[in-house]
Image: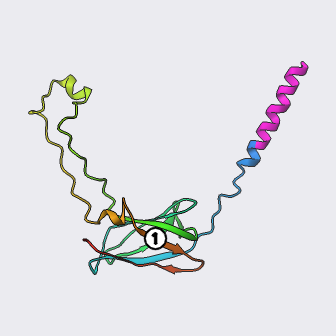
Amino acid sequence: MRCKDQVSLIFSLIFLTVCCFGCSGGGTEVELEKVTGVVTMDGQPLANAVVVFIPDEGNPSTAQTDATGKYELAHRGNAMGAVPGKHKVRITTGQPPAPENDPDADMSQSEAATGIGFEEMESPKKKTKDPIPAKYNTNTTLTADVKQGENTIDFKLDSK
């Protein structure tokens, strides 16, 4: 083996060793605290709402409210809870926003290739507007502070 090949082999082995130690799974465990609560809108339980806690650092935790508005946060799969600290909170129905119809938009190439004119195309079904105001989801003003131990954090939303 030539000297140049030996040096390349040594650097490759060192690089591989460093990568293995760097990816050995350390640091994947996070401290989680139990978070439950009730979401209401205009004083009534808000069923089937998606609640998302977004920490300043780390992965978010999510839940879906039941028929009585109750939720319990889950973090990355089946690990229950949220990381301690300050969170931005978003509450939504989980429906994607309604697409905006742009009458000036060009037809897609596939539509043009089929020869379908605008008058022959089916109009897209309009999605219903999210009944939860944007100040609680896309433009959220909601925050929460998750502390050590069990946390009960309720949200009283107003539809106006």
**Looking at this view, is 4 or 105 the one in front?**
105
Q: In the figure, 103 relative to 6: above or below?
A: below
User: Which residue position is annotated with label 1?
Assistant: 143
Q: Is residue 10 magenta?
A: yes
Above or below, comparing residue 139 to residue 18 in the picture: below
Write down the quadrant of residue 119 in the picture. Answer: top left
Residue at image position (43%, 78%) is 37
- Residue 92, given in percent of the width and then of the height, sits at 34, 63
Residue pictured at 18% horizontal, 25% vertical: 114
Quadrant in the picture for residue 134: bottom left
Please indicate whether residue 111 sits to the left or right of residue 3 in the image: left
Residue 154 lies, in percent from the top left, at 41, 79
Query: Residue 131's spot in the image, x, y percent?
Result: 25, 65
Quarter of the image that includes the N terminus: top right
Determine whether 61 is above or below 110 in the image. Answer: below
Q: Quadrant of residue 17?
A: top right
Q: Is residue 22 left or right of residue 152?
A: right
Numbered disc 1: secondary structure: strand
Residue at 63% from the left image edge and 68% from the top image edge: 31
Q: Which residue is most to the left?
A: 119
Dot 1 crowding, Cα within 10 Å, few <14, some 14–19, many 20+: some
Is 7 one of the magenta-colored residues? yes
- The kind of secondary structure the magenta stretch mainly shows is helix
Report the label total.
Answer: 1
Quadrant of the snapshot with the C terminus: bottom left
Magenta stretch?
1-18
Q: Label 1 sits on what residue type?
A: Thr
